[in-house]
Image: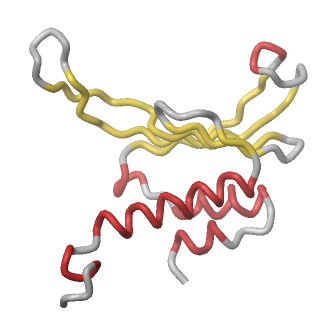
């Protein structure tokens, strides 16, 4: 079973978050931070809600409007949050917030399928090897 399969087979939000936190390697993907947070009403959470937040940051290339070229910037690409009441969310840079284990697992499966199709050589997809 590969690492993504472990996440896709997690049976609870807590299991998913613990597996994800254990699998990530900062050396392989950029900066990984796990922190405790205390949120209040401003974060759409009841006052005094605790959460664990896992962020993944990477250096990415973005268009530079001033030069017409590209520039390298360090950005938070993914933010996973597990609250004390078991709510799991995932925010990807430029995407809508996803909530709930089922929604997150479905999206991960779609990403895996898209990556699989993108990474396959043309000869493998048209039946000629």
Position of 69 compared to 85: left or right? left
Q: Compared to 1, does 99 lie above or below?
A: above
> On the picture, is 53 further left or further right than 72?
right
The one of 47 and 70 positioned closer to us in this rendering: 70
> Relative to 110, does residue 75 appear above or below in the rendering?
above
Name which residue lies at 19% across and 18% down. 64
Q: Position of residue 47 (x, y in %)?
A: 89, 19
Q: Residue furthest front?
A: 126
Residue 47 left/right relative to 82: right
Quarter-of-image position of residue 99? top right
Q: Residue furthest bottom?
A: 129
> In the orientation shown, which residue stands out farthest toward the top?
66
Q: Position of residue 79 (x, y in %)?
A: 57, 39
List x then y, in percent, for residue 32: 48, 45
Count of marks overlaid on the render: 0
Q: Residue at x 18, y 25 (%)?
A: 71
Q: Residue at x 35, y 57 (%)?
A: 28
* In-front residue for pair 85/127: 127
Q: How is the image coloured?
A: secondary structure
* Residue 122, placed above or below residue 62: below
Q: Residue shown at 28%/67% (left/top)?
A: 119
Quarter placement of the C terminus? bottom left
Residue 103 percent across, percent down from the top left: 70, 52
19 lies left or right of 43: left
Q: Quadrant of the N terminus?
A: bottom right
Q: Nearer the viewer, residue 119 or 57?
A: 119
The quarter of the displayed image where residue 15 is located: bottom right
| Observer-nearest of 43 and 96 | 96
């Amino acid at each position: 079973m590969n690492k993504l399969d472990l996440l896709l087979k997690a049976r609870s939000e807590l299991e998913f978050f613990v597996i994800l936190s254990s699998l990530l390697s900062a050396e392989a993907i950029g900066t990984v931070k796990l922190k405790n947070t205390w949120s209040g009403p401003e974060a759409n959470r009841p006052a005094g809600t605790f959460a664990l937040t896992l962020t993944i940051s990477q250096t990415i290339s973005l268009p530079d409007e001033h030069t017409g070229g590209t520039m390298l910037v360090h950005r938070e690409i993914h933010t996973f949050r597990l609250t004390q009441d078991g709510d799991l969310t995932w925010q990807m840079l430029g995407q809508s917030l996803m909530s709930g284990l089922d929604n997150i697992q479905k999206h991960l499966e779609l990403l895996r399928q898209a990556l699989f199709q993108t990474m396959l050589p043309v000869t493998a997809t048209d039946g000629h090897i």
